[in-house]
Each structure stands twice: as structure tokens, then as C-alpha cells.
Image (cartoon, helix red, strand yellow):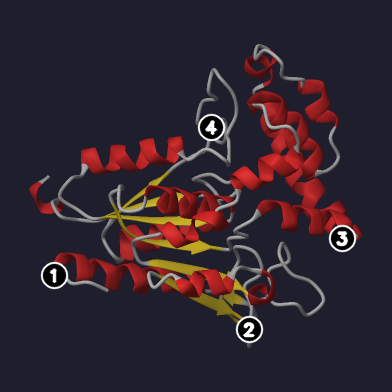
Amino acid sequence: SRTRRGVPTVMVFPGLAGHSDKDYIRSLCACVTQALGWRACVMNWKGFHDAPISPTGVFRPDDTSDMEVAIEAARAKHPSGAIFAVGFSAGSNQLVKYLGSRGEHHPVSAAVSVCNGFEYEKHVRRIEETTVGQEVYSRGMTYLHQEYLRKHRDELSRIEGFDLDRALAATKHSELDEALVCTLYGYKDVADYYRAVACRPFIHGVSVPLLCVQAADDPLFTEGGVRCRDVLPVDELHDNPNVIYFETELGSHLSFIEAEVPGGVSRHEHTFCDRVVDAFLTYAQDKVRNRHTF
């Protein structure tokens, strides 16, 4: 409509096994649409939630082509407003890879990366080396993906060369990746695949303002008092003048919950991360609208 011309669209990319009904996604979208009055568009990965699976395979964290299609579709439908993007966890890794690999050849005006590991192999290996990491995080992520595989058993069983039984028998994330992705897409092993997934080599190519929000206590990347900034490529992020690295002391992985404790826990409507994204994108929109540089 005429009254909606020029309104920004925020593209939202969930984490691994995430989708548009996850609390952290719904919370951000409510902030974007209600507090800011903008559009929000969530991309559900292939096969997750109500998104159909591809005839040629499953969701691929190494492949940014689906993300490109979604972003270009939003630009075509709403050409008069800015396109912003927010990625969470695996979605943030893919978003940074998309931005960095395309340089200036994309329609995104500014972006936010939340709880990004920047490189897969190091973090997957570290998680699987500890009892808690293996039994809680690795096994949990594996279970979520196996539920996804069971949901699409009929379609997947028709894909030549895919050993569904092997994937369903996996007990840790790296085993699942070996059976799921390496078999389908020709990687020689999971290390080869993880190198292809990682967005770290593309940080230098990011040409638009990018806010990287991390929690110092994120259990997927840290343990034993080690902070996120001690294990992530912070120097490379700082070397790119378009990137801001912002780390909180607390937040865990995709939580950032705020609450009032005295007299009983009363959770705030939106998370701290929601408010940070709101502030950053509001500032970005002001610059875009007035054609100013950051």
C-alpha cells in the first residue's frame, strides 16, 4: 500500500533446526513489527517447520543460495524500503558468509550477527571432547536433526546415495554431518565440509555495517572461564571497519533474557538482544533514509 512505501524489511535467519515459531525468533519479529512498525520476514530452512524439503537434498549450511533467493525476493516485492538482515547462530554464520562472499553485490543495507561461531570444526570438536558437551549439546542437536530426517523419511529415501539409516544411527553431530552432508554433496570428510561452512574467511569482504552480538558465557564456544572473545576471530572482525564486535557478560546461546527478580521472576517482553538489534537497525535506517554513511 502507499502508506507502507519506504518501510524497511528485516530478513531473519534462525539457527540450526530453528524456525519462525521459536521464541527468540518470534520475540525479535514482534519487536521489529510492533515497536518499529517495519516488516519482518523469516526464512525457514528446507524441511524445517512448514518449509518443504528440496528434491535434491537437505538444508546446507555451506550453501548461501537459498538465502540469496529469499533476500532478492524481498527486494523485488518491496523495492522502496531498505533491506536489513539478522542471523542467529548457524543463520548468522551463513549471513556473514553471504555478505562477505558478495562484497557490494547484494541489497542488504546493514546486518546483525548473533551468537556466531565463525568456524564450525573447532567448536564442534571442542563440544564433543567434553562429557557435558557431547551428552547435552552434541546429542541434543543430533536429535533435533534426526527428528527432521524422520519427518521427511519418504523424500530422503528417494535421494540416490543417501544412507538414511546411517544418519539416524548417529550419536553425535559430527557423525550426523558425515552421513548427512558429506554423503550427499561430495565432501571427502567432515573437516572438508566444516571448512566450506565457515564464514571466517569472508569477514574481510563484508562491505555493509555489521553488528556482531556475542555472549561471553556462550557454552557452545567457551568453557572454564574462557570468554568468547578469547576464541573467536575478534582481530579479524576489528580489521574490517564495517564490523562492530559487541560482547555481553551474560546471554548464553541465543538467550539474552531480561527479568525482574525481587518478589518473583517477571520476564521482560523482549530480550536484551531484541533491544540492541532495534537500536542498531533504527540508527541504520536513519542513515539510509538520509543517505548518510555510517
The picture places residue 220, in percent across and down from the top left corner, at 72, 62
Circle nearer the viewer, 1 or 3: 1
Relative to 253, is 100 on the left or the right? left
Three-letter code for the amino acid on which mark 4 is drawn: Lys
Three-letter code for the amino acid on which mark 2 is drawn: Val
Report the disc number at residue 237. Answer: none
Tell me the SS state at disc 1: loop
Question: Which badge, 4 or 1, comes first in the chain's sequence?
Answer: 4
Circle nearer the viewer, 2 or 4: 4
**What residue sits 63% from the left and 60% below the top?**
117
Q: Which residue is mark 3?
A: 132
Circle nearer the viewer, 1 or 2: 1
Circles 1 and 2 in contact, beta carbons < 8 Å? no
Q: CA distance from mark 4 to mark 1?
A: 37 Å
**What residue sits 78% from the left and 42% below the top?**
174
Q: Which residue is mark 2?
A: 261
Q: Is residue 239 above or below residue 37?
A: below
Q: CA distance from mark 3 to mark 2?
A: 28 Å
**Circle 1 residues within 10 Å: few <14, some 14–19, many ≥20:** few
Question: Which badge, 1 or 3, comes first in the chain's sequence?
Answer: 3
Report the disc number at residue 290. Answer: 1
Camera-side residue: 45 or 4?
45
Q: Which residue is mark 4?
A: 46
